[in-house]
Amino acid sequence: MENLRIDGERLWASLMEMAEIGATEKGGVCRLTLTDLDRQSRDLFTEWCEAVGCTTTYDAMGNIFARRPGRNNDLAPVMTGSHLDTQPTGGKFDGAYGVLAGLEVLRTLHDAEVETEAPIEVVCWTNEEGSRFAPAMVGSGVFAGEFDLDYAHGRADIDGKTMGEELERIGYKGEGCGGREVGAYFEAHIEQGPILEREEKTIGVVTGAQGQRWYEITVVGQESHAGPTPMAIRRDALVGASRIVTEVNRIGHDYQPGACATCGMIISRPNSRNVIPGEVFLTIDFRHPDDGRLAEMDAELRRLAGKIAEDGGLELALEQILQFDARPFDEDCVELVRQGAVRGGFPHMDIISGAGHDAVYMAGVAPSAMIFVPCEGGISHNEIENAEPEHLADGCQVLLNAILEKSGAK
Ligand code: HGY
Ligand code: MN
Ligand code: MN
């Protein structure tokens, strides 16, 4: 086992082939969840896993599980994986790296005819990004009991199509979701931030993830003519929403160190240049490693939103659609990742994840840990996202070592 090595070139080739599905002009990937492109990526992943002797199944959320039997298949599986859906201006590595690193582990075990004690499963989770359908991490969330199935199937995109309908349409709507034991869960992912690169580390030993809250706000004023309507009597929904954006950003700065605050999506209606906007839809993404501070940010937002509505003669509906507190990962699994980095001779450091990942929900139902590798300039959720083949290979080697340990390979 000591000398078992993953094949970094094969991993890179698979990443580049997968990145062709939804490739954009600028070198990124646009492969929104449950689109035909997502179906193509799922079909390719399934084909690759079956080529190394795995059986593949998918559940009621379209989560795909590629299973490699062990000596004792009554044991709970050791699981690894991530997601194949991307942001609209996503990159080649966010999500795909974790899924294809898992595949590379399967290929390496297959080639070496290694038998593990426990079965191994590589999973592709549905709708990790929460871009087309909010909130994020819904596939792993239903599996881990954070969301119920009907709620998830009912989530609609901007055109009113629901996840349930789209799962049906692409042929990935199975039966049941979750409710089974998982022995351990590991997820390899690019850091999506600047720390590893700045500290010249190859491996991030992820000890946990920061807490998050997502909100949807609808501001209602009154549409009216941009010419004859005096400034003093206007109820301009976009002015109200703009004040919220400014205050959200201020809250982010006021709650340093640690806070993140983003308004990523805004839809102004009727969006006509000579009509005073009557209604604005706005999203807010709050994050903080400290739950208490995150709760304070929440309270300040609600207070300010009420004041902005009153000042502007506006109606304002604020709905929180996602919340999870800061999540520590399992110390034994984290130590396996750390030992894997030491054994590989890879410079490493402990790190908290700024991004949400499927591992966050899996940590609620199985001992879980993550392996980060650097990405160029810390840039992600951007078409220029890039990572070094060597770093991706090193992270995959650490993943293999952790899975060999946890699954009792001999
Ligand atoms: O938002 C996130 O952290 C992740 O990309 N879903
Ligand atoms: Mn991701
Ligand atoms: Mn992402």
Image (cartoon, rainbow, N blue to C red):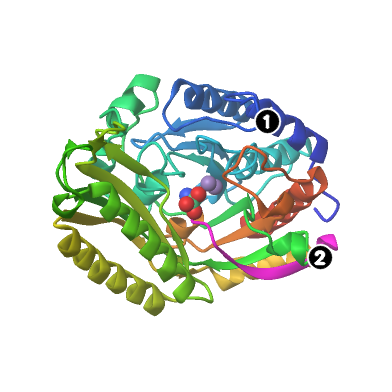
Residue shown at 85%/63% (left/top)?
345
- Mark 2 CB in 8 Å range of ligand 2? no
Tell me if mark 2 has few (under 14), some (14-19) or many (20+) residues whose alpha carbon lies within 10 angstroms of its own: some
Q: Amino acid at mark 1?
A: Gly
* Left or right placement of residue 169 versus residue 360 in this view: left
Classify mark 2: helix, strand or loop. Answer: loop
Q: Pointer 2: what residue?
A: 347
Report the magenta residues as a range: 343-357
Mark 1 packing: few (<14 Cα in 10 Å), some, or many (20+)?
some
Q: Amino acid at mark 2?
A: Pro
Residue 352 in the magenta stretch? The answer is yes
| CB of mark 1 near ligand 3 (< 8 Å) | no
Q: Nearer the viewer, mark 1 or mark 2?
A: 1
Q: Earlier in the sequence, mark 1 or mark 2?
A: 1
Q: Is residue 243 visible?
A: yes
Residue displayed at 45% across by 68% down: 252
Residue identified by numbered label 1: 27
Along the viewing direction, whichever of 348 and 234 lies nearer the viewer: 234
Q: Rounded to the nearest whole Å, what is the CA distance between mark 1 and mark 2?
A: 29 Å
Viewer-side residue, 219 vs 232: 232
Which image quarter: residue 246? bottom left
As for residue 88 lying within the magenta part, the answer is no
Q: What's the residue at 32%, 24% (across, down)?
A: 168
Residue 51: x percent and y percent?
65, 25
Residue 410 seen by the camera: no
Q: Are marks 1 and 2 in contact (CB under 8 Å)?
A: no
When the figure is inspected, residue 211 is found, relative to residue 262, above or below; the finding is below
Q: Position of residue 332 (x, y in %)?
A: 60, 71
Which quadrant would residue 167 be assigned to in this image? Answer: top left
